[in-house]
Image (cartoon, rainbow, N blue to C red):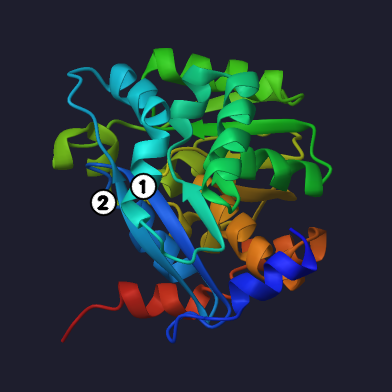
Amino acid sequence: MSDARTADRHADRNVYAPHGLLGVLTPQANPTAEVEMSMLLPPGMAACTARLTSTKPAMAQRLVDYFDTLSATLGQFGGMRLDAACFACTGSSYLAGAAREDALLEAAGKACGFPVLSSALSITNALRTLEAEDIAIVSPYDTALTEASVAYWQARGFRVRHVQRVAAGGAASGHPIYGLPADAAQRALAAMPALQVDAVLLLGTGMPSLAAILDNPQWRGAPVLSSMLALAWAGAGVCDARHRGPSALREWIGGKHWRAAHASRMATAP
């Protein structure tokens, strides 16, 4: 973004978001993505949410719909002065594939006048920032979507060395992923066999991930990333260059900007 466009966009800051305002696009029944985003963003940044909606009966059909109707969903923000929009649904990227995802995001960004980021591409950029090549993934998906995710990461140039499946959750909010308990990702990490990888990915914007990262910022020396952490990091980097680069990303993984917010959110009410 040019200095002139940046100055213009920052000229009339939202009083509650003086350092950056993001739009978050989350699947219609996802109860996790916007809550984790609110915890992850550093002070002075904020997010507003639009829902990705579809009337299709099957999850795979809805995931395709979310990309097909991206322009209409972005239209929910009207003339809001956003620094970036964050597409918080990795499953859509897996089914669309890397090439179509790149084209869709570029076209959407040109149309609305600000960057449109996806959780999958944000993970890709985070892995490249960390110079990671060999990865392990923790998947809450069914077999078909898990296989699609593996194909996606391979197409992005990574070697998937291991896939750890997460035990199925309940049917909360209409899909088993949204009914996963808070420790589902931790238990999956604990069950992983010993292996040498450059990074571990906790997939799915609907799976609670932040406690697992705080407990395991490094798994056998490999940094642990989640879909929402990578997306929030990428969005913050658009707003403020200090959040870019490997050292800043490692601070994000270690919880520097969001540990206290997570503790406050998770505190048991008296």
Q: Which amino acid does label 1 sit on?
A: Gly
Label 1's element? helix
- Position of 124 compared to 35: left or right? right
Q: Which image quadrant for residue 124?
A: top right
Which of 161 and 119 lies nearest the eye of the viewer?
119
Which of 112 and 103 lies nearest the eye of the viewer?
112
Q: Which amino acid does label 2 sit on?
A: Pro
The mark tally for this picture is 2
Marks 1 & 2, CB-CB < 8 Å contact? no
Which of 50 and 263 lies nearest the eye of the viewer?
50
Coordinates of residue 126 in the picture (x, y in percent): 70, 47
Residue linked to disc 2:
31
Q: In the image, is residue 47 above or below residue 132?
A: below
Instruction: Identify the residue shown where x is 74% and y is 58%.
Output: 1
Q: In the image, is residue 161 above or below residue 122?
A: above
Residue 82 appears in view: yes
Residue linked to disc 1:
75
Give the crowd class for mark 2: few <14, some 14-19, many >=20 residues within 10 Å.
some
